């Protein structure tokens, strides 16, 4: 199969596939729903991990929310960058941005993220 992309995201259930593609992408991310999944992603050489679910979410795949304190504790103890995913709104983005990255499935727009919370480069 020929793939013309610079990056790829692996759902947690397909993480083992990332090993076959190591070195073919400039950047690989994976989702993780537990600390064990984070460890597996790090062993696989993943460049960034989307850790879910941090806040209550209506997503079909959302589990019980971890909350920002557990996210912070987890993200500070990992070598690989961890991005919060799940139920993030403008206020929660400001909380997370103080100590970690964030991701959002539904997209980011002015109705979701307050411009004041965005880094200057994005304004």
Image (cartoon, helix red, strand yellow):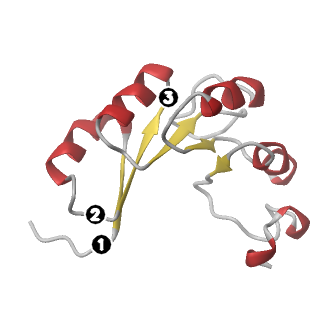
Using residue 99 as the reference point, say whether residue 63 is left or right of it.
Answer: left
Mark 3 vs 1, N-terminal side? 1
Looking at the image, residue 115 lies above or below residue 57: below
- Badge 2 element: loop
Q: Are marks 2 and 1 in contact (CB under 8 Å)?
A: yes
User: Which label sits on residue 5?
Assistant: 1
Left or right of 6: which side holds 31?
right
Contact (CB < 8 A) between labels 3 and 2? no
Quadrant holding the C terminus: bottom right
Q: How many marks?
A: 3
| Residue in the image at 61% along x and 52% along y | 103
Residue drawn where x is 79% and y is 68% of the image: 119
Q: Which residue is mark 3?
A: 33
Residue at x-position 77% and y-position 50%: 97
| Residues at marks 3 and 1 touching, judged by CB atoms closer than 8 Å | no
Residue 31: x and y, percent? 45, 40
From the viewer's side, name the closer residue of 15 and 76.
76
Question: Which one is in front in this view, the residue at disc 3 or the one at disc 2?
Answer: 2
Which quarter of the rendered picture does the N terminus lie within? bottom left
The image position of residue 90, as x and y in percent, is: 83, 54
User: First in sequence: mark 2 or mark 1?
Assistant: 1
> Disc 2 vs disc 1: which is toward the camera?
2
Q: Quadrant of residue 109?
A: bottom right
Residue at x-position 84% and y-position 50%: 94
Residue projecting furthest to the left: 1
Q: Quadrant of residue 69?
A: top right
**Local SS, label 3:** loop
Answer left or right for 78 relative to 69: left
State which tag comes first along the sequence, 3 or 2. 2
Residue 58, position in %: x, y? 65, 39
Mark 2 lies on residue:
25
* Disc 3 to disc 2, C-alpha distance: 23 Å
């Amino acid at each position: 199969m020929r793939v013309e992309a610079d990056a790829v995201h692996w759902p947690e259930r397909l993480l083992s596939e990332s090993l076959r593609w190591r070195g073919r992408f400039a950047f690989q991310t994976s989702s993780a729903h537990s600390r064990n999944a984070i460890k597996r992603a790090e062993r696989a050489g993943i460049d960034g991990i989307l850790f879910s679910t941090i806040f209550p979410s209506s997503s079909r795949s959302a589990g019980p929310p971890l909350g920002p304190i557990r996210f912070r504790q987890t993200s500070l103890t990992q070598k690989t960058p961890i991005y919060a995913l799940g139920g993030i709104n403008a206020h929660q983005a400001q909380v997370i941005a103080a100590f970690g990255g964030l991701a959002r499935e539904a997209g980011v727009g002015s109705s979701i993220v307050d411009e004041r919370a965005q880094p200057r480069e994005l304004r």
